[in-house]
Amino acid sequence: MKYDIIVIGSGPGGYVAAIRAAQLGKRVAVVERAELGGVCLNWGCIPTKALLKSAQVYTYCKNAAHYGVEITGEAKPDFAKIVARSRTVADTMSKGVAFLMKKNNIDIINGFGRVTGRGAVDVDGTAYEADAVILATGARPREMPFMPVDGERVITSKQALTLPALPESMIVVGSGAIGSEFAYLYASLGVKVTVIEYLPQMMPLEDEEVAKQMERSFRKLRATVLTSTNVKSVTVNAEGKCSVEIEGKKGAETLVADIVLSAVGIKSNIENIGLEECGIVVERDKIKVDEHYMTSLEGVYAIGDIIATPALAHVASAEAIHCVEHICGLAPAAVDYSTVPSCMFTSPEVASVGVTEQKAREAGIEYRVGRFPFTASGKATAAGDRDGFVKLIFDADDKLMGAHLVGANVTEMLGEPTLAKALGATAHGIAHTIHAHPTMNEGIMEAAEAASGAAIHL
């Protein structure tokens, strides 16, 4: 059967590409070997947030007395029900993607897809043709030889979503978004958590001040954070306990826990999809593409986690739209990778866009910083969530270069500084934009005022 566009993979890159192509009048098919929606909807972003919401509700119940609410008896997490709710949320979202596919007359081809030539795709032995093929096969948790995953004691994020019961103790290796979110989740539910990070700071891609704030927040949860620490080996002993050999600031040590979560990054799903046979160039485990995401084989494109751009769902979606619009003869604007927002749904939350202060300093860029602590926020004080701050970084021309936020619900605040950066907004412009009171979002205005030397509430 001949299509205009065949998309292999139905995650946030794949399904967005398919829908946009259908909107532009193309006949489209999506090849998917598992659930519609990919890892993000089924085993990543969405079910993780459902688990984290349950943890937040549990925390509020434990602290209800602080808000003048009396709860009879002890609040306890029912982890089986927490997991079941998470799976229901994921299933609902996957069904939503299926609805969108049907609404847009997109064919779903179930199976494993691979490219066999220009405009040629094989799905489990059945041949299909298309004018263009978009590879959106995503990624999976990376496994390290010193930390062999067995799915029971040494696990990845996928197993962490559906553990049969809460362990007494857990070691999380890696403190990026995945590691930090699961560490917060399990620590808030009463698990003794230790986070091990190879690099000198927790959340190594975030601003230094953000990392320090989050280390303090994890200590409040009675979680241990070990930075500048190397994991040498992970083994499971005869009693079913995990032994973790580490080398850190105190030298060599052996840690023991019920569960070890490997959160050391992801690996692109590029094996056995026809790249070698078709001569599609791969560099450092990523498919090489041009500015419109076309591979070295004309008519075959690649987007999302399988190319050398930030491995984020919203980035894959942006690449999908650009790619499809280019295929359809439009002139889409290039994806602006300097203005990619990033979020971590810990408590407090972490949200950032643009350069960190250390990156600006290392690059020799002239800059100034405006800060606003949520301890000075009326809304944060009323809500009982005063931890964190807003930090804005402006260049010599007064334009916003970076924004780094820590606090309750700051992921919902990130849209403003992201748009401000994209539009070239200045500290003066942000400071003189009236923000509603009382809101957490006032912190952005206040930080801009601080950068301009006109702070009122500090």
Image (cartoon, rainbow, N blue to C red):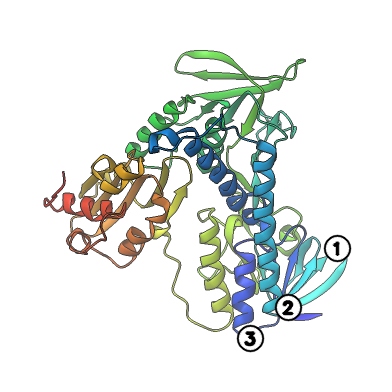
The amino acid marked with disc number 1 is Asp
Q: Earlier in the sequence, mark 1 or mark 2?
A: 1
Toward the right, the furthest residue is: 125
The amino acid marked with disc number 2 is Ala
Task: Note whether residue 271 is visible.
Answer: yes
Q: Residues within 10 Å of mark 2 (few under 14, many from 20)?
A: many
The amino acid marked with disc number 3 is Gly
Which residue shows up at 53% across the image and 32% down it?
Answer: 72
Residue 130 - label: 2
Residue 196 in the image: state x and y as whole percent.
52, 27
Cα separation between marks 3 and 2: 14 Å
Is 434 on the left or on the right of 75, as rendered?
Answer: left
Residue contact between numbered discs 3 and 1, judged by CB atoms under 8 Å: no
Task: Note whether residue 37 is visible.
Answer: no
Q: Earlier in the sequence, mark 3 or mark 1?
A: 3
* SS at mark 3 in the image: loop
Cα separation between marks 1 and 2: 17 Å
Task: Please name the residue that numbered disc 3 is placed on.
Answer: 25
Q: Is residue 276 above or below residue 246?
A: below
